[in-house]
Image (cartoon, helix red, strand yellow):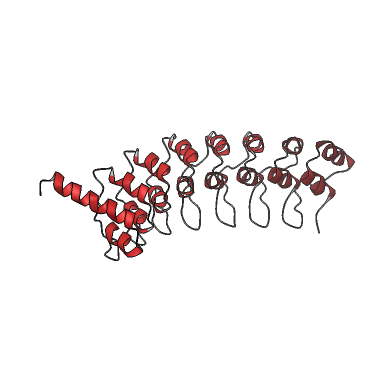
Amino acid sequence: MGFTGLHGVSSLGIVEIVASVLEMKEWDLNESDCVGCTALTWAAIRGYEGVVKILLEREDINPDQADTRSGRTPLWWAAANEHAGVVRMLLELADINPNQVDTNCGQTPLSWAAKNGHEGVVRILLERKDINPNQVITYNGQTPLSRAARNRHEGVVRILLEREDVNPKLVETKYGQTPLSWAAENGHEGVVRILLEREDVNPNHADTEYGRTPLSWAARFGCVAVVKIILEWQDVSATALDHGGQTPLSLALSEGHDAVVRVLRNNANSRTTHRGV
């Protein structure tokens, strides 16, 4: 079913055998097997740097060929599986497209590496001058920063924000949430602090689906630590209404998050006292 000897030895990663097999006859190095993978794809998936090096030395190989099942290139697979050495070797080639999205989810290598918290791979990918650090996922419009923020990867968030061209205010197309909104909803205190340190991040930005601010999302899911962090910012609106007419306090009350209710009420009382009312 198309799974040749070259596919087999490349998937096993034994460099000497791969070298011998390549000398046996003329191979179609770009031939896909029964699951749509080339020999290079198999080596990239499993992180076999020696095999990747041998294959890339061949002039007749296409290093950017995507598999036929999910449209994922060798670079995509290496980045997703945190094989930093393979990623670096592939990126040294000028004809590698680091922004190529797969056909399964519409994600780039950077997006997937950010989602999984692969800090080393993210750094290597960002070294390419033609990388787009804000490229969104096809099906929901999330950026690599959104993916990292949503999954509590503080290191990746910091790495991405080191670049001046990374926009922390970009909203996804599906729900209209920002990276801060995702981090607040999921209770990721560290990520919330990192994002709020940025002057260009708006802590009151409401998503388009429910009209909820990051504070509302944190209150809705009982993330008391995040609620406290957001309330430290003086320009935060603690009474913003969502599309259903709910405030952060009413959301916390409806979900029975007593600790959040106490924090929000204490904040309201302290502000009233501060104003001398």
Total count of labels: 0
| Residue 123 in the image, given as x and y percentages of width and height | 54, 35
Would you say 111 lies left or right of 220 here?
right
Would you say 16 lies left or right of 87 here?
right
Q: Residue furthest right?
A: 24
Instruction: Name which residue lies at 46% across and 45% down.
Output: 145
| Residue 140 in the image, given as x and y percentages of width and height | 47, 57
Name the one closer to the observer, 116 or 144: 116
Name the one closer to the observer, 189 or 16: 189
Above or below, 240 relative to 82: below
Instruction: Name which residue lies at 56% across and 56% down.
Output: 105
Instruction: Name which residue lies at 65% across and 37% down.
Output: 90
| Residue 229 in the image, given as x and y percentages of width and height | 33, 44
Q: State the quadrant of the N terminus.
A: bottom right
Q: Quadrant of residue 82?
A: top right
| Residue 64 in the image, given as x and y percentages of width and height | 66, 44
Name the one closer to the observer, 86 or 92: 86
- Residue 202 seen in this snapshot: no
- Residue 172 seen in this snapshot: yes
Q: Quadrant of residue 95?
A: top right
Q: Residue furthest left?
A: 277
